Image: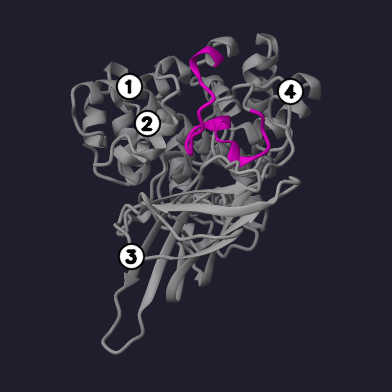
Amino acid sequence: MKIAGPLDRLIRGLGIGAFLLFSVSAEAAERTLSPARSPTFGCLQQHWGNVSCGQVYLGSEGFQARALVGQSTPPEPSVKLELVGCTRQTQGWECEQPPVLRFIGVAEQSEEPIVGLYVEIDGMPADCAGSTCDVPLEPTPEEGSEVVFSLVTKSNESSEPQFALVRVVEAPQEAGEEPVWQVEILSSRIDDDWIDRCGLAWFALPTLDRPDWLTIPDEADDLRTSESYVYLEQRLAGLGPAFRGSASAGGTLAAAQNVNLTTPQSLIEIWQNQFDTAILEAASARGLPGRLVKSLFAAESQFWPGSFPEMEEVGLGQLSEPGADSLLLWSPPFYAEFCPQVLDAELCRQGYWRLATEHKAMLRGALLRLVNADCPDCAYGLDLPKAERSVPVFAEGLVASCSQTAQGVYNATGNTPGFLSTYEDLWRFTLANYNVGPGCLSTALTDTWQQRQPLDWSHVAANLPGGCRRAIAYVSRVLGEPAE
């Protein structure tokens, strides 16, 4: 077990109180956080984008954000990564030659010339000279190898350290076949359409023998299911024969689908698969496993995208007021895009933490309305196109939960999450966080760590207090695993 490695030494200045998971004042947050940089936590991770960390905002990992918080600064020199001579696959790369990772110094708008690069793999410096460096990759342990890299300018100043996690495995071959290497790279600095934003938040890679719920579907048909859902059946039955006639005639649900509508189950089958394309696209854009996203919708709403007044939750992923708060807090890219649609852009530049209470409430209310497909004047009483458009919002909310979970693990242990827990268990923590909230998860993580128990799901689940324990059955249901 790796504990307190080079990454952690860089983030020792982070506060370690569980209150960071909740709504505290910006001033309190700033007193708790130091300017230390991290590959794991929010705006402290400057290599994500052009955000000044003078104004603290505990956000999620991901793509570069536009005008998040504080004052934007000109792009600083940075390092980009390329994998040479390999072909992108659904999961990672395939290389027919021994893989080479290329590090490229990029000056951006800086007038400072780049004179060298520093690259270190698992603590061993690579031989690099100039602004480009090719480093041959050797087979790594299953958990991958840490890569730390930075550049040196003419004035002998180094850029902020940047990080990657790299796994190289020689694929098994038949006798006489040429060797093939499988490579996975976890880094924001590589030009790739598929970036596992949750893996980046945790600094962890999935196991090689990944479970079905972590496999990446190639197309929407791979997500197709035919399950029975009691609640959904009741809601559809309440729509009456007019609904069935519309669907049978090739209406919204039956379009381009050859399904017999003579039974309730066939109607349920159409309904539960109508969002598959939107799920695949939203999941792929964020490096999420599409099957897990669909399973979460099944567990939360049985694919009914309207409101659940008795639960004060709405939409496919059952967004609540606290859930909206977490999304706006832990996904600065989403906040930056959404806030100016509701509030004045100048107000939004303060960051979510610094908004007045009434402005936060306005944003949360607007977000709940955005994902609530109730529509009394629409066919079926639902705005189904609106429900489809809400899928990326819930996918972003799941990424936000991943980052909130990463901070929770760090708060409890002082260590990078991927050094203590497996990728699969970090997903289980994240689903528990999504279901019962960060207070429950924080208590369980802290108690597990203080009792010197392994930080795995079985021990963390056993330490969930009281009413929080319903998350155990929830996680099992989403992942299709036997209930513990």
Q: Are marks 1 and 2 in contact (CB under 8 Å)?
A: yes
Secondary structure category for the residue under label 3:
loop
Q: Is residue 65 visible?
A: yes
Instruction: Give the residue type at disc 3.
Output: Pro
Q: Give the numbered dot on residue 432.
A: 2
Sequence-earlier tag: 2 or 3: 3
Q: Residue at x 24, y 42 (%)?
A: 1
Q: Secondary structure at mark 1?
A: helix
Q: Which mark is residue 139?
A: 3
Q: Residues within 10 Å of mark 1 (few under 14, many from 20)?
A: many
For the magenta stretch, what is the residue range? Answer: 30-52
Q: Residue at image x 33%, y 29%?
A: 471
Inter-mark Cα distance, 4 to 2: 30 Å
Q: Nearer the viewer, mark 4 or mark 2?
A: 4
Q: Earlier in the sequence, mark 4 or mark 3?
A: 3
The circle drawn on residue 468 is 1
Q: Picture coordinates of residue 414 (x, y %)?
A: 35, 27
Mark 4 or 3: the one toward you: 3
Quadrant the C terminus occupies: top left
- Under mark 1, the amino acid is Cys
Mark 2 or 3: the one toward you: 3
Q: Secondary structure at mark 2?
A: helix
Q: Which residue is mark 4?
A: 348
Give the number of callouts.
Answer: 4
Work out whether residue 192 can be spotted: no
Q: Point out residue 269 in the picture as x, y percentages from the top left corner.
A: 49, 53
The mark lying in front, picked from 1 and 3, is 3
Q: Position of residue 267 (x, y in %)?
A: 52, 51
Question: Which kind of residue does numbered mark 4 sit on?
Answer: Cys
> What is the crowding at mark 3: few (fewer than 14 residues within 10 Å), some, or many (at least 20)?
some
Q: Which mark is residue 7?
A: none
Query: Which of the marked residues, 1 or 4, is nearer the chain's N terminus?
Result: 4
